[in-house]
Image (cartoon, coloured by chain):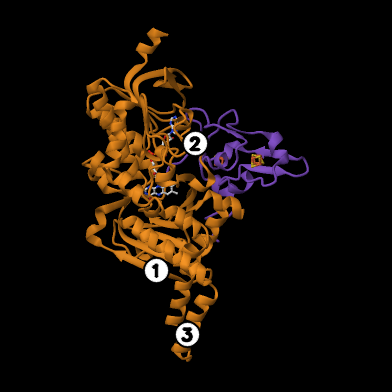
């Protein structure tokens, strides 16, 4: 694929403008994550926000990349999901 | 408290400045009532993403002169339906009509939503961007206002137009928790290409545009569709796939989009282009059967928040605009009667039932469940067979044609049990009669 269209999701997101909120708006119940087999959040998220670290047995949430679509909220019941604060978060211009 | 209430009180508050919200707000303002339109993004459209087509009939109903100053990229003249195969071939059905080109147009939500709000402000709507509504204030069972990061605001009526996730309709208990099978996740990339390149590759006159829908290929057997829309200087390529399918098949949405982009039909169209923006959004999917309660004392729900979308035709913004307008009209009539209770607001649902909105949703109520139920057939096996047929039909290789067609026919039945074919036929007939009934 052409260089001008990056392949890695991180580089696609890099093209976007964000006003990062100071606090995380996505709060999974980490005790539930320990027992969770599917880890669906790490698959369906279009911005690759969730990563599970097998050695540390911990889910990391890079909330600053979030596109605020709500897919993780529907796919998993154990996320305390909010919108970022007024005016914060992603800014789409050409979508 | 009582003083605060008076100071911060307007006639109507509309939450969400998408197509539903802006249409509701401008309708209320035109009726002479004081209305505030509240939006969490820095500007209207900054949180919004869609495929790319707005329908002129709805735009005209809200802003009759929109063609004069609205940010239109291209009017759609070419509609293509493409069945992708697993290999690199495909079958395309293309409908072109230069004179019906004004039926719909391509535009970006960042431009369109913002333009709509600017028009609404000229007509008296008070716009409050960068304002997240955290909760609705309910007193004695009636919605009386909103809580924001900064202050509380009060109104006789609140119109809830906060989109597919509608945390507010959920707060009121008007809808249940959304299931993964009831939403489609959409992702798209906007890719920069020159005007000339776009017109050459898509065979378009200047200002004319293409709307292309893609079936099969990477979504074979899933409830999913791809799309390509032409802007003036860029092309939007994206897809929508049921969240349930992504979850069950463990597919990452952006990887699926990369697979779609690598099919020769698509890759040739975007070759040499540069990524401008990547975005994602949900589409409500459940249709009529998953519609929430549409009104309660002091509030109405419009647009995606009410799950008013016809997925089969990629129509959502028109449902949003017209439902917003009906909610606005109902609010005005409530002021005339001085009755803001559910008793009066039920008029909103009556208006929806008498219009294309609920008529279409009722007619299509079985389409999505049937297609998802038999997606391996309708969105996988048959599109592939169509390609196989044309592969044989167009290949000249010195083999007798009759033998090749016989082999195709034999294969068609060998790979599909009779009971499956029967179920598909029944489903197909039910679909057609369901819509025509
Ligand atoms: C991939 C994809 C492709 C699509 N393609 C098409 C197409 O080509 N044509 C078409 O007609 N439709 C299409 N649709 C559907 C269409 O986008 C929606 O139906 C339409 O946008 C619904 O409008 P709405 O006003 O109800 O909601 P939205 O457009 O979602 O607007 C809701 C607004 O409310 C704001 N908001 C939400 N919560 C709060 C809160 N708590 N406080 C303040 N503000 C809030 C949001 O920021 C947003 O601006 C597509 C959708 C997707 C996802
Ligand atoms: S957030 Fe949900 S899906 Fe993700 S690991 Fe935790 S429990 Fe599992
Ligand atoms: S809201 Fe969407 S983009 Fe944000 S973390 Fe959830 S799935 Fe990812």
* Badge nearest the viewer, 3 or 1: 3
Where residue B332 sits: x, y (%)? Answer: 25, 27
Quadrant including the N terminus of chain B: top left
Where residue B336 sits: x, y (%)? Answer: 22, 22
Per the image, the residue denoted by label 2 is B176
Question: In the rendered image, is residue B207 in sight?
Answer: yes
Disc 3 beta carbon < 8 A from ligand 1? no
Chain letter for purple, please: A
First reached walking from the N terminus: tag 3 or tag 1: 1
Residue contact at pointers 1 and 2, CB within 8 angstroms: no
Q: Quadrant of ligand 3?
A: top right
Q: Which mark is residue B169?
A: none
Q: Is B394 on the left-hand or right-hand side of B414?
A: left
Per the image, the residue denoted by label 3 is B406
Per the image, the residue denoted by label 1 is B92
Q: Is A32 on the left-hand or right-hand side of B100?
A: right
User: What chain is tagged by disc 3?
Assistant: B
Q: How many marks?
A: 3
C-alpha separation, residue under disc 2 versus residue under disc 3: 52 Å
Q: Neighbour class for label 2 at 10 Å: few (<14), some, many (≥20)?
A: few
Chain letter for orange, please: B
Residue contact at pointers 3 and 1, CB within 8 angstroms: no
Tell if the residue under mark 1 belongs to the same chain as the one under mark 2.
yes
Q: Is residue B182 above or below residue B425?
A: above
């Amino acid at each position: 694929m052409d260089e001008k269209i990056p392949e890695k999701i991180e580089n696609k997101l890099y093209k976007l403008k964000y006003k990062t909120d100071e606090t995380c708006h996505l709060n999974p119940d980490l005790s539930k994550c320990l027992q969770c087999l599917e880890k669906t959040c790490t698959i369906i998220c279009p911005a690759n926000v969730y990563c599970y670290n097998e050695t540390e047995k911990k889910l990391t949430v890079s909330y600053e990349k979030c596109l605020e679509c709500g897919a993780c909220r529907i796919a998993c019941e154990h996320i305390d999901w909010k919108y970022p604060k007024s005016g914060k978060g992603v800014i789409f211009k050409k979508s | 408290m009582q003083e605060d209430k008076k100071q911060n009180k307007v006639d109507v508050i509309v939450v969400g400045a998408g197509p539903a919200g802006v249409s509701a707000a401008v309708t209320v303002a035109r009726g002479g009532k004081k209305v505030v339109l509240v939006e969490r993004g820095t500007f209207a459209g900054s949180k919004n993403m869609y495929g790319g087509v707005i329908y002129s009939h709805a735009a005209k109903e809200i802003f009759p002169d929109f063609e004069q100053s609205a940010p239109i990229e291209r009017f759609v003249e070419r509609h293509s339906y493409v069945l992708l195969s697993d290999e690199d071939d495909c079958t395309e059905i293309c409908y072109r009509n230069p004179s019906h080109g004004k039926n719909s147009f391509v535009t970006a939500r960042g431009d369109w939503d913002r333009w709509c709000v600017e028009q609404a402000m000229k007509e008296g709507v008070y716009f409050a961007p960068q304002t997240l509504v955290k909760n609705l204030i309910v007193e004695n069972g009636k919605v009386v206002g909103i809580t924001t990061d900064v202050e509380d605001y009060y109104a006789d009526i609140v119109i809830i137009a906060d989109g597919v996730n509608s945390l507010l309709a959920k707060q009121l208990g008007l809808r249940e928790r959304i299931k993964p099978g009831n939403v489609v996740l959409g992702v798209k990339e906007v890719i920069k290409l020159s005007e000339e390149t776009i017109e050459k590759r898509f065979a378009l006159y200047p200002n004319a545009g293409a709307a292309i829908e893609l079936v099969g290929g990477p979504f074979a057997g899933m409830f999913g569709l791809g799309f390509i829309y032409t802007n003036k200087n860029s092309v939007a390529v994206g897809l929508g796939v049921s969240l349930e399918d992504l979850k069950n098949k463990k597919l990452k949405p952006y990887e699926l989009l990369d697979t779609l982009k690598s099919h020769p039909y698509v890759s040739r169209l975007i070759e040499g282009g540069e990524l401008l923006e990547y975005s994602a959004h949900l589409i409500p999917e459940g249709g009529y059967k998953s519609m929430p309660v549409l009104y309660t004392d002091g509030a109405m729900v419009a647009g995606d928040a009410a799950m008013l979308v016809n997925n089969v035709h990629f129509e959502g913004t028109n449902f949003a605009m017209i439902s917003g307008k009906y909610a606005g009209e109902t609010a005005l009539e409530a002021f005339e009667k001085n009755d803001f209770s559910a008793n009066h607001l039920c008029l909103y649902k009556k208006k929806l039932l008498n219009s294309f909105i609920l008529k279409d949703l009722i007619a299509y109520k079985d389409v999505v469940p049937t297609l998802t139920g038999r997606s391996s057939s309708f969105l996988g096996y048959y599109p592939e067979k169509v390609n196989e047929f044309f592969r044989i039909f167009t290949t000249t290789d010195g083999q007798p044609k009759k033998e090749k067609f016989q082999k195709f026919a034999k294969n068609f039945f060998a790979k599909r049990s009779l009971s499956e074919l029967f179920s598909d036929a029944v489903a197909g007939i039910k679909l057609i009669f369901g819509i025509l009934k």
